[in-house]
Image: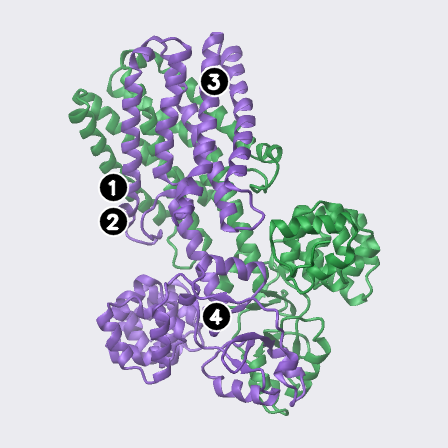
Chain colours: A green, B purple
Amino acid sequence: MEPIRAFELSKEYLESLRDGIEFLDNDFIIQSLDGANVADIAAILDELNMDEAIYVLRLLDSDTSADILIELEEDSLVKVIREMEPIELAALIDKMDSDDAADILILMPSREREEVISHLQEREKSANILDLLRYDEDSAGGLMAKEFIRANQNWNVVQTIEEIRRQAEKVEKIYSIYVVDNRQHLLGRVSLKKIILASADTKIADIYEPEIISIPTHMDGEDVAEIMRKYDLESVPVVNAKNRLVGRITVDDILDLIREQSEEDIQAMTGISADVEESDSVFRISKARLPWLLIGVMGGLMGSQIIEFFEVGLQKYIALASFIPLVAATGGNVGIQSSSLVVQTLASKSVFDDTPWQRFIKALLIALVNGVVLASFVFLIVVFVYGFEYIFGLTIGLALFCVVLLSSFMGTVTPLVLDKFGINPAIASGPFITTANDLLGLAVYFGVAMYLLKL
Amino acid sequence: MEPIRAFELSKEYLESLRDGIEFLDNDFIIQSLDGANVADIAAILDELNMDEAIYVLRLLDSDTSADILIELEEDSLVKVIREMEPIELAALIDKMDSDDAADILILMPSREREEVISHLQEREKSANILDLLRYDEDSAGGLMAKEFIRANQNWNVVQTIEEIRRQAEKVEKIYSIYVVDNRQHLLGRVSLKKIILASADTKIADIYEPEIISIPTHMDGEDVAEIMRKYDLESVPVVNAKNRLVGRITVDDILDLIREQSEEDIQAMTGISADVEESDSVFRISKARLPWLLIGVMGGLMGSQIIEFFEVGLQKYIALASFIPLVAATGGNVGIQSSSLVVQTLASKSVFDDTPWQRFIKALLIALVNGVVLASFVFLIVVFVYGFEYIFGLTIGLALFCVVLLSSFMGTVTPLVLDKFGINPAIASGPFITTANDLLGLAVYFGVAMYLLKL
């Protein structure tokens, strides 16, 4: 038997853990994971198959298993909770914060979910979870937890410390204590630092900060993230329509959200339709990539029809074919630059943003500048370096200029329109829109060329 | 005179503030900004010109002005600090945390910087700032602040509360108290919650958590962000090579860093060379966009030479021209999908990642699947819908297949190579690499076609 080593995240450890599971060496498993961070244990379990992962979870104490469950990747999590007995899962959910519990329960079919909830020990916990499940997952209501410390403004410091003691086990990280009136309206916050430094009989009403930022339950998670970043908040209270305190959002959930959303944006831009990672199977990755590739291919096939339409002219001026990649690539580059600038602004909306009309004028001016520079450059090269006739150089230059204008316009307008309809504007840089723009660009290029060359 | 309204971030308020400045209506300015969040005031000052912004900063008390300065956008900040007297700036920097002070001072020429530091009131503060300036801005050392609470393991709770009281003004947000031995080695942390709930004579040694995550000064900021996200940390201690506690990084700085880096990635992908925003001037945006557009155009011009090289064959088979956009677009789409998957994995490095060799094999398999599906689809359409000869359909299909393989290979390998050399792998999806791939793809397409069609 090999000696038991301290836990270290490595492929070697993964192998020895697998051996430990196979030979039911529970002592090794428990001892080697002792003191390891739950996020690291979760990363290990993500690599195991479902039976192995459940075997390990059942060996560990329920506090640790609950924390691990929260940190699992969604794929693994779904498999594990599908396999666990409702009563077993309920025991773990009893140990979780309400927001983590709701995030896990939302992944289950509603019948199983209700069964798990019926097995929960605490009445309050199940009420909290049911409450959270009502909110949209990506809204402030869906992100908030019901565990936080609230103090009545009429309490003194000692009473508040008593409340902290009462809730200490439920609320792991405190940050601030939220101050409410008798009807649970949010009045402000008081930091733990102030509580420590104040004398025992100080009234909360005398030390709390009244000017604080709170979030309505319906606010979009992305906006919550931007507010927490801008105002340097590590936690923020959530209020309902009547300004009653109903929850709190902590920055750890926001960091996860930001990461998910930047991955979603990149996926929208690159046209990978499902949430895949490089470590997924060949089949799964291909399946996620093919739909958009096929759309691109269909666009290309339509493009071939556009070019065919101009075939008679092309026969006479075969050189027109040589400049197809130039025009297509430039149109694509201009469009992606334009849309990414707009998407960037949309991500941090400000009251000082330009109106759509001002944006449009500005985009037009930039397109004019870029268009003139690029078209002139191409004209000079085509005529003086490649030695084509003057009129041919003019044709290519002018066609390019038109494509730059068109792509800028589409790149600016598309994300604004998508955003208006509540669609992620990042897909404006994605394959569907890009393909459509390619086709338009191609038609413009040949249209302008045929007209100028009188073909 | 219009009535003084409460502060609200709006274009109307901006106008009345401008009027207030023009007519030297100091009462209006001070009263209307009273109680406003410093981040909001900074957003207003970002919209003013430099003289107006400085006028407002001088009116407000130095605590507020210092906080506003930290929140300004870099453009405005650089202008403002260039204009301020060193002694005036020093008075503001005296009010800041050392990390914010260092972030501002790093923007100044070294001579001015030294002068400002020489005017600082506190010896300790200037020593701290000089220490921080030695670190790379994007490393843990450059991100950390010198303000945090440390407790010796031999202290009891009362002594620790005394230390908190002593440092209370300097350390705004406490989160955790870091526990050290007599030689300043980091031993662990104790939360404020524990301090509040423990009895007065409890020894710190008995209540601190020993298993905590610390960060070495040289760690890259992006890795720090990933660790804080993964382990749900709102602050993390920074240690030097001898495990001595030298600073702490808080999550607010990490949120800013994440945002900057995701903007940088998008800019790398879209080829916008400088850090511009939609609100910048037409000239500035054009200047930032043109370099990459020109590279794309030059690529397109080279592409025209490649096509010209095959012109004789193209004359005979003019239909080959129609499929240029199809091949180019598919190559581009495949390449961007491949590189973005690799970039995503690189952003959260894990010990369970595949080796480069495994990645390469997997990318090849995926490319084979995608290539076969796309090529077969195109073959069927070209032959049975568009009615081309069998051999022509086979040519287009096979050429497309080769381009898919090539683009997958380049898309997988390029970000890995860039990352190896410490270059941001996101630029693999940017215009330079894409343009190079387009040219390769074009050459492969015509090469295969000419060979198969015996042209």
Camera sees residue B4: no
Q: How far apart are the two marked residues, 4 and 3, measured between alpha carbons?
A: 57 Å
Q: Residues within 10 Å of mark 3 (few under 14, many from 20)?
A: many
Q: Which mark is residue A295?
A: none
Q: Which residue is mark 1?
A: A369
Does A433 appear above or below A246?
above
Query: Pointer 1 and pointer 2: residues touching (CB < 8 Å)?
Result: yes
Q: How far apart are the two marked residues, 2 and 3, measured between alpha carbons?
A: 46 Å
Quadrant, the N terminus of chain B: bottom left
Q: Which mark is residue B239?
A: 4
Q: Which mark is residue B398?
A: 3
Does A395 appear above or below B245?
above
Q: Residues within 10 Å of mark 4 (few under 14, many from 20)?
A: many
Q: Secondary structure at mark 1?
A: helix
Task: Give the residue type at disc 1.
Answer: Val
Query: Pointer 1 and pointer 4: residues touching (CB < 8 Å)?
Result: no
Q: How far apart are the two marked residues, 1 and 4, measured between alpha carbons?
A: 51 Å
- x 68%, y 66%: residue: A146
Q: Which residue is mark 2?
A: B283
- x 44%, y 28%: residue: B406
Mark whose residue sits in front, 2 or 3: 3
Q: Chain of mark 2?
A: B
- x 81%, y 48%: residue: A111
> Residue A398, position in %: x, y?
25, 29
Q: How far apart are the two marked residues, 1 and 2, measured between alpha carbons?
A: 8 Å
